[in-house]
Amino acid sequence: MKKLLSILTIILLFSCHNQAQVNPEQEAVINAEPVVVPLEDGKARAYFASGCFWCVEAIFESVKGVEESISGYSGGFTENPTYEASNTGKTGHAEAVEIIYDPEIISFSELVDVYFGSQNPTQVNGQGPDHGSQYRSIIFYQNDEQKKIIEDKKAALAKELDATIAAEVYPFLKFWVGEDYHQNYERLHPNQSYIRNVSIPRLNKFKAKFPELLKEDEKH
């Protein structure tokens, strides 16, 4: 009887602990109506989180039709997040990228293929050596059509791999541009140890997998 009571007490404690982790502010973000970003000079914008933004920025900038990839933060509830605050895992945000692209050259659907094809889709709360909610995988949608594209591709990948796909699907609300020193980090710091050992191998793995999606100068 004492053993049973002890087990019940432990279960209750864990249950209370889990309930305490529920953040109403984050729930409000997940359940919000998405914000649609209008075309500007014929260019569209899409938003993705997939581990360290140094890696993700470089991958998307190698893709034809992508004009620019900007590192920043999205998916959370904290105003004006900083790199230091995001790294605590308490802002709700993940390191993310804003992709400015020409929809006449590459579609949102193809960008989602780039996203899934350039990461470990089953890794929860991180990519490679980077762990924590600030490195979790998120795909952001701006309308029902984008949401369906994401969910269909996620379901197909789960079936193909016979595994749970870690990427969360969020409505896009706001993108906070990261600090200047994070922008174009892989290109500007090719000899930095993380870039050499993590970013560049991840980029090269993507290039080998999707040569048909690369810009001409990235194929060599």
Image (tube, grey):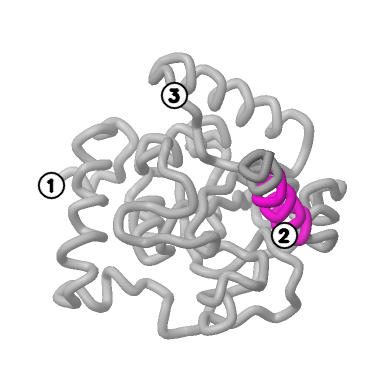
Q: Nearer the viewer, residue 119 or 99?
A: 119
- Give the Cα separation between the discs numbered 3 and 2: 26 Å
Answer with left or right where residue 37 lies relative to residue 125: right
Above or below, 110 against 96 in this view is: above
Q: Secondary structure at mark 2?
A: loop
Judging depth in this view, the residue of 145 and 18 nearest the camera is 18
Helix, strand or loop for disc 1: loop
Q: Residue at x 57, y 70 (%)?
A: 89
Mark nearer the viewer, 1 or 3 = 3
Q: Main secondary structure of the magenta part?
A: helix
Residue at the spot x=47%, y=84% of the render?
A: 180
| Picture quarter with the N terminus | top right
Give me the C-alpha separation between circle 1 and circle 2: 48 Å
User: Is residue 153 in sight in this rendering?
Assistant: yes
Foreground mark, 1 or 2, reads 2
Q: First in sequence: mark 1 or mark 2?
A: 2
* First along the sequence among labels 1 and 3: 3
Residue type at tag 3: Ala
Which region of the structure is painted magenta? 8-21
Q: Amino acid at mark 1?
A: His
As drawn, the label of residue 177 is none
Q: Which residue is mark 1?
A: 220
Dot 2: few (<14), some (14–19), or many (≥20) neighbours within 10 Å?
Answer: few
- Say the numbered circle drawn on residue 163: 3
Is 18 a magenta residue?
A: yes
Query: Where is 58 relative to 115, above or below?
Result: below
Q: Which mark is residue 21?
A: 2
Residue 208 vs 6, above or below: the answer is above
